[in-house]
Amino acid sequence: MNKIIKCCLALGTIGILSVTNLIAQTDKYVDRVQLTNGSILWGLSEIEGEQLKLFLTSEDSVILPVSQIRSLKKGRLNPGLYQDRLLGVYYQVAAGVLVGKSYQFSENKGTFSASFVSGYKFNQLWGLGLGMGVDYYPEQRHIPLFVEVQGDLLKGRITPFYQLRTGWSWGEDRRDLEQIDAQEGGFYIQPSVGVKWHFAGHSYHLQLSYVRQEATTRYQPIDFGNGQMVTNVEDRVLQRIGISTGISF
């Protein structure tokens, strides 16, 4: 038995470590090989007579005698390996709609929303990111800058997840009315829940959010005579339901 086989049988970890490279190159079903010593290897296999050739990556492989194999099963990639691939730096792009009334007497119609986030995933349940978005309302446009906390609730290819964004926005009026002096943003918060589908090197998600945006509209001063100037300031809380989809990589 050559040195590669002995190392593979003794440690039983080469396949688990190397298959992370295989994940980056293929999204196919892979083989779970359990050896007689209890070790488990993952890869793509080919039977060659009384031997099994197991590809750990597109370039690396080991030859195993059939007598040393207890079982061979084909299945999707180990759920834990999907999770390991997603740790570290991540980027997320998402787009969707905001549904509901902007405030009490406004029209009920959907508007557009989009965001970009860059962050770091520390473990399955905990990731931290910084992002920017753009939210359109019937009368206003807001550009929030926010901090994001997010994590997956389960291990595996498909998992529910949570997300919380909070920050501050810059506002702009979309009506272009002369009597409006300034449109200001304010505190922004967006809790979300959804589902992720993990693939090789990236994941897709679908989420449902509650969006709360504070805003202030300042109108130009009105002269009531006798030097009396009155400035109308209108504070609003824009509350919407967000439905969005996107990709993380």
Image (cartoon, rainbow, N blue to C red):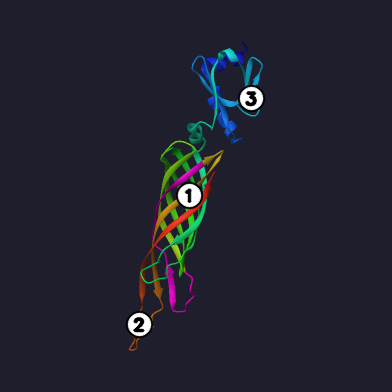
Give the mark toward the camera: 3 or 2.
3
Earlier residue among tags 3 and 1: 3
Q: Residues within 10 Å of mark 3 (few under 14, many from 20)?
A: few
**The magenta stretch spans which residues?**
173-197
Residue 207 position (above or below residue 218): above
Q: Quadrant of residue 213?
A: bottom left
| Image quarter (top left, top right, bottom left or bottom right) of the N terminus | top right
User: Is tag 3's residue or tag 2's residue first in the polypeptide sequence?
Assistant: 3
N-terminal-most mark, 2 or 1: 1
Give, as a three-letter code, the residue at label 2.
Met
Residue type (three-letter) at the residue carrying disc 3? Asp
Q: Nearer the viewer, mark 2 or mark 1?
A: 1
Task: Report x, y in % for residue 65.
Answer: 60, 14
Q: Is residue 50 above or below residue 239?
A: above
Question: Which residue corresponds to mark 1?
Answer: 206
Residue 60 bears which disc, if any? 3
